[in-house]
């Protein structure tokens, strides 16, 4: 029991520390008014069976007021319908079709990169987006200014596109808590921000060189951040550059999504746990060590659920009651501090009553992580 309390205590302290750190905002190094006219971005959007959303996403990017004449949108069409591809081509975006027996995001991106290389295309940076992502006005200018300021790898601020169901609200809260703890909090203490898999801006040549080495079923973004952190490259967080991201609307999609994420997290934790200590003590690589520790710690939802159950049990059979109450209080304080005010206003009894159902979906996801190691688990958008 003592070992369990220590493990959960470390996890709670981690959440609380970086939640507090997120409140002491250290402004990014982007400088306004810089010459960005000659900077060209490649907006790359992998689209696996995303006919329902990809056309609106393409329209959103090319309609941005600051979309430059040298910028380009590339849609990676993986099993898109012919009529969708035709519509995209009419929008004057580049469509690259890919064909795989077993599709993965890393395979799709690498295949598209080879095509662009064979065509002689050159870009300063790549902006990687999901098929459901929409840019908020000003995004392109802000990211180009940050890039020109010297930031080679930038994670931008992903927020909810929809808050139309209770599950979507919980997913939005979870996303913003992660933004506060793993991005802004880390940025404020001088550590790299965590990558999400979309809303990433990266020097084009760097992106190509790292992606060539990545071939994983899921969690390519986690592999990417481990690789760049091992090389001691800093990942900047640009909080004021917003990307709208569709939140899951029901627990079934949530379960599938988290199964994929947890499988990747557990896999990378096992692979890198020992090397993380070597990197820390031999090379002083705090970023890499910290990243692997994140993978070892339990997800926030598991923390909330397990500590809540432990509290109920301790009230019935008093044991370590003071410690468990303290951990619960500190955890909830950290989560509330990390949640933006506009989402705190949405917390009501209906949302809180959804938590037990979501917690058990998370437990089911843990039991299914073996499936995610064998094939990519797709979560549909726009449904």
Image (spheres, grey):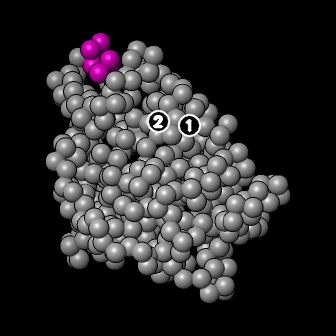
C-beta proximity under 8 Å, tags 1 and 2: yes
Return the residue nearer the eye: 35 or 299: 35
Query: Which residue position is annotated with label 2?
Result: 171
Return the residue nearer the eye: 245 or 136: 136
Q: Is residue 124 above or below residue 139?
A: below
Could you tell me residue 193's position as x and y percent?
32, 58
Could you tell me residue 89's position as x and y percent?
74, 64
Query: Which residue position is annotated with label 1?
Result: 248
Q: Is residue 234 above or below residue 5?
A: below
Q: Quadrant of residue 368?
A: top right
- Residue furthest to the right in view is 82
Q: Please state, as top left, top right, bottom left or bottom right, where the C terminus lies in the image.
A: top right
| Residue drawn at 32 percent across, 52 percent down | 239
Circle 2 crowding by C-alpha within 10 Å: few under 14, some 14–19, many from 20: many
Q: Say whether residue 40 is left or right of residue 59.
A: left
Q: Please state, as top left, top right, bottom left or bottom right, where the N terminus lies in the image.
A: top left
Q: Say whether residue 12 is left or right of residue 133.
A: left
Q: Is residue 288 visible?
A: no
Q: Which residues are magenta?
A: 311-317
């Amino acid at each position: 029991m003592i070992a369990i309390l220590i493990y959960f205590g470390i996890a709670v302290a981690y959440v609380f520390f970086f939640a507090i750190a997120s409140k002491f905002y250290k402004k990014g190094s982007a400088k306004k008014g810089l010459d960005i006219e000659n900077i060209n971005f490649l907006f790359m959007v992998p689209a696996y069976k995303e006919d329902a959303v990809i056309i609106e996403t393409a329209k959103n990017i090319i309609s941005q007021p600051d979309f430059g004449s040298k910028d380009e949108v590339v849609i990676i069409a993986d099993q898109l319908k012919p009529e969708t591809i035709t519509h995209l081509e009419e929008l004057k975006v580049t469509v690259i079709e890919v064909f795989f027996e077993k599709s993965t995001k890393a395979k799709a991106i690498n295949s598209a990169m080879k095509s662009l290389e064979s065509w002689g295309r050159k870009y300063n940076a790549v902006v990687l987006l999901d098929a459901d992502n929409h840019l908020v006005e000003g995004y392109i200018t802000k990211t180009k200014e940050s890039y020109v300021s010297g930031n080679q790898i930038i994670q931008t601020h992903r927020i909810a596109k929809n808050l139309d169901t209770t599950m979507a609200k919980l997913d939005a809260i979870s996303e913003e808590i992660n933004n506060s703890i793993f991005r802004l909090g880390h940025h404020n203490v001088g550590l790299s921000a965590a990558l999400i898999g979309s809303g990433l801006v990266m020097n084009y040549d760097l992106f190509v060189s790292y992606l060539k080495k990545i071939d994983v079923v899921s969690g390519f973004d986690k592999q990417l951040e481990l690789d760049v952190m091992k090389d001691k490259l800093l990942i900047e967080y640009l909080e004021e550059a917003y990307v709208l991201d569709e939140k899951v609307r029901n627990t079934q999609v949530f379960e599938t999504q988290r199964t994929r994420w947890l499988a990747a997290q557990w896999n990378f934790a096992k692979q890198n746990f020992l090397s993380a200590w070597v990197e820390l003590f031999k090379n002083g690589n705090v970023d890499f060590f910290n990243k692997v520790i994140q993978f070892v710690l339990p997800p926030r939802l598991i923390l909330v659920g397990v500590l809540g159950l432990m509290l109920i049990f301790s009230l019935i059979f008093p044991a370590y009651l003071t410690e468990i109450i303290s951990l619960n209080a500190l955890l909830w304080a950290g989560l509330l501090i990390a949640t933006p005010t506009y989402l705190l206003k949405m917390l009501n009894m209906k949302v809180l009553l959804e938590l037990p159902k979501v917690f058990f979906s998370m437990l089911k996801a843990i039991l299914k992580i073996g499936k995610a190691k064998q094939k990519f688990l797709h979560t549909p958008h726009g449904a």
